[in-house]
Image (spheres, helix red, strand yellow):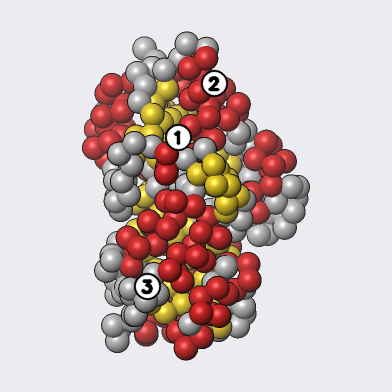
Amino acid sequence: MADKKATRAAYGEAIVELAEKYPELVVLDADLAAATNSNKFAKAYPDRFYDCGIAEANMTSIAAGMSTVGLKPFTNTFAIFAAGRAWEQVRNSIAYPHLNVKVVGSHGGPSVGEDGATHQMNEDIALMRALPGMTVVVPCDAHEMRLAVEALLNYNGPAYLRMCRYATETVTAEIPGYKFELGKGVTLKDGSDVTIIATGITVPFSYEAAKILENEGISARVIDMHTVKPLDEELVLKAAQETGAILTVEEASTIGGLGSAVCELLCEKCPTPVVRHGVPDEFGRSGTAAQMLELYGLTPEGIAAKAKEALKLKK
């Protein structure tokens, strides 16, 4: 793995790179352009960039209106505000009329670090996933983020794109046959004993965890579930049937997110032991990004330990 970069940085580069190809793309920000990396687009295309100030609800409604005249708006702010403060506008002005707006939430999860519990948005995936018709995408690395942005530009409908502040190494660019498609997970590593289904920055960690397990004689399959909604049901069911135990990993609350989506599917169609790993039912706290990830066991070592727990649940 190489090319250590935050997904927010890759996003900022991607919207600039794709601007000429997609002239309908417009970018809105809530006075956080330097942090969300939309400032690159503002500099390159000032006539297509709109700083709405610290007014996330207004920004969301403006984007909804823009979408009705053929534009493709991407709104940008921290996840805590995109999915928190503006949730009502996202629900009623974007999701309900099923408008073509992409809501981009930066600084998701506890790896925001020192900003603490008020800014560590762990509930955004659950909130957005609950909205009817809302696609939820959480890219795992810089390479995948670039592909996700273009896929969303070609997707007609509302979507939530989550990105992180913490820089991780790129894994997807090195996987033979890797292909990004909305609603389709990717098997990064095959395995027969247990399956690790991860999303976001926990995917590279899970890939490393599989190597740790391999050294201990445990064959772990690793699935990159970049699209949490709609979930790739076929891939999850196949993994459950073939490995008999599942570990879900997310840098978000274990309530309502990827783990819940997987459990909802399996309890209905293929009852399988599942361990959900992520942020428990609590608010975050202040610390460095590395300290926060260590606290919640969102490290290769922590994920490997949880995979062993899942393995013990097999009949």
In the figure, 221 relative to 262: above or below?
Answer: above
Element carrying mark 3? loop
Sequence-wise, the earlier of marks 1 and 3 is 3
Element carrying mark 1? strand
The label on residue 258 is none
Question: Mark 3 and mark 1 in contact (Cβ < 8 Å)?
Answer: no
Q: Specify the amino acid type for callout 3.
A: Val
Sequence-wise, the earlier of marks 2 and 3 is 3
Left or right of 224: which side holds 231?
left
Q: Residue at x 50, y 23 (%)?
A: 211
Residue 254 seen anywhere in this rendered image of the structure: no
Check disc 1: other Cα within 10 Å, few if <14, some if 14-19, many if 20+: many
Sequence-wise, the earlier of marks 1 and 2 is 2
Q: Specify the amino acid type for callout 2.
A: Ile
Q: Residue at x 28, y 21 (%)?
A: 242
Q: Residue at x 59, y 36 (%)?
A: 298
Give the Cα distance between marks 1 and 2.
17 Å
Q: Specify the amino acid type for callout 1.
A: Thr
Give the image location of residue 294, x and y in percent. Answer: 67, 36
The label on residue 212 is 2
Mark 3, residue position: 101
Check disc 3: other Cα within 10 Å, few if <14, some if 14-19, many if 20+: many
Element carrying mark 2? helix
Give the image location of residue 70, x and y in percent. Answer: 28, 83
The label on residue 248 is 1
| Viewer-side label of 2, 3 | 2
